[in-house]
Amino acid sequence: MRRRAGIGLAAAATLVLASCGQSEDRSDIYVQRFFGECGAVYGALTDVGAAKGECGIVTALFNAFKAENRDVGFDVNVVAWPGYAQLAAQMAAGDPPDLVTMHQSVISDYQSRGLLEPLDSILAEAGIRPQDFTEAARRGVTRNGAVYGLPWDTVGGLYHVNTRLFAKAGLMRDGRPILPGSAEELLKQARRFKAATGKPYFIQSQVNDPATHVRNLYSFLLAQDVALFPDAQHIRLRTPEARRILQLFRTLEAEGLTTRNQDNPAAIGSFLDGDGGVFPTGTWMIGPFEQEATTKGRPLHDAYAVFPYPRLWGHAAAYVDGHAWVMPKRSRTPAQRRALVRLFRFMAAHDFDWSRTGHLPAFKAVIDSPRFAALPHRTDIAPLARIGAPLPGMVRRQGAIEGLVGEEIAAAIAGTKPIDAALADAERRVNELLAQQQ
């Protein structure tokens, strides 16, 4: 069937989700994913261990599955990131894919409208148990006690550190960076770092990148056990905890202890060129930074380490998200279901291969394995799977909320809006958005 686009998610929820008539023995399955298109390089590769990067590894994985399951008609469609507008259109047309990549933070938008299949039974057929997931992965795919996706990884913010500059600032001990243990210690270290190196302590992507500030805010609120969402229709931001987080980052900005006016490509370039000490960005940058760290002559050569966010308040915590494989609701033949069971089993068996991207694995057995520990920096970042937490599963429109909150707190940190006013405006705007869902 031809797959159409242009219809919103709300429209999809009002239609009966059923595919065209199909014979009972039909076993073909249709998978839709993002992660980029790299068929020119990896289109024929079935040796998953030889693939690199998100696109290369997932392409090789699907090639290998197809080669090992020639009795299954297996079609893969690559969509531009993140692909949700196209998915909503396919759902509205009654012809969604059989399996889709979805951010765990987005699952509630679809699950709450009855657009996703609960996967408990099909995962059980594949020999996959939710108790085998890491804590962060299990929280990411569970809604109302049911599992709505096969978790594929955990992604979140990390402190990527230039150890050569840290050594110059006297912030190394026994070959490891000394990370701060409080907000006051962070400011002390940042001032010392700038005085010793002439460079800012932080490199940050702050232009057109609301995730940077929101990731910081959510992580440090989680550390203080703040109930950010007291219920599904309200966010709570006008708190002393939120104010002191913003005040810390406002001080860093005002004193020139962080880069300013950089978007993500510029911030990445600054870190690669050795223009600052710490770049708080995601798990997905471990691979590129490690490659630079092992390339002689590059500013980052033998000067790279990475860790979860330090504990500045409360306890160790981090806001995380992740990718998952979800099944949109549609009619499927028993043969298609058996094919999907095989695919789920295959994907779970290759979770280690996916962890080479830098994302944390979704299965405890992988994160505890010697081969995962042997990958660069993995023992240092492994605690993220334990301390990481998503927003509550009841919260919908998390992407839109990130944009609203990020816009307001960016203004506060830049000094163009008072902190209290920014928090009040962010709270009001988010609550207005959530009220539209009632």
Image (spheres, rainbow, N blue to C red):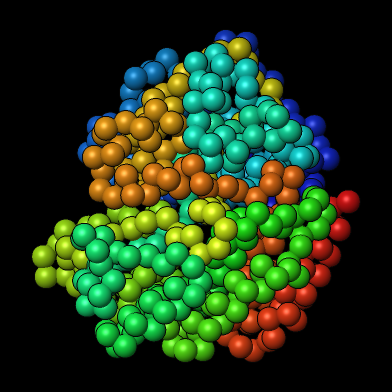
Q: Nearer the viewer, residue 222 or 425?
A: 222
* Quarter of image, res 416: bottom right
Q: Is residue 428 visible?
A: yes
- At 60% from the left and 48% from the top, the residue drawn is 390
Residue 348 sits above or below residue 306 on the image? above
State which quarter of the image contains the N terminus.
Answer: top right
Q: Nearer the viewer, residue 75 or 143?
A: 143
- At 51% from the left and 89% from the top, the residue drawn is 254
* Quarter of image, res 313: bottom right
- At 51% from the left and 46% from the top, the residue drawn is 387
Residue reaching furthest to the left: 296
Q: Is residue 395 left or right of residue 369?
A: right
Q: How many marks?
A: 0
- Measuring from the top left, give residue 44's x and y in whole percent: 28, 36
- Measuring from the top left, give residue 197's x and y in whole percent: 27, 84
- Measuring from the top left, give residue 231's x and y in whole percent: 81, 50
Q: Nearer the viewer, residue 275 or 191?
A: 191
Q: Is residue 35 left or right of residue 56?
A: right
Residue 289 sits above or below residue 141 on the image? below
- At 72% from the left and 38% from the top, the residue drawn is 111
Residue 207 sits above or below residue 147 on the image? below
- Measuring from the top left, give residue 166's x and y in whole percent: 27, 72
Q: Is residue 263 visible?
A: no
Q: Nearer the viewer, residue 428 or 198?
A: 198
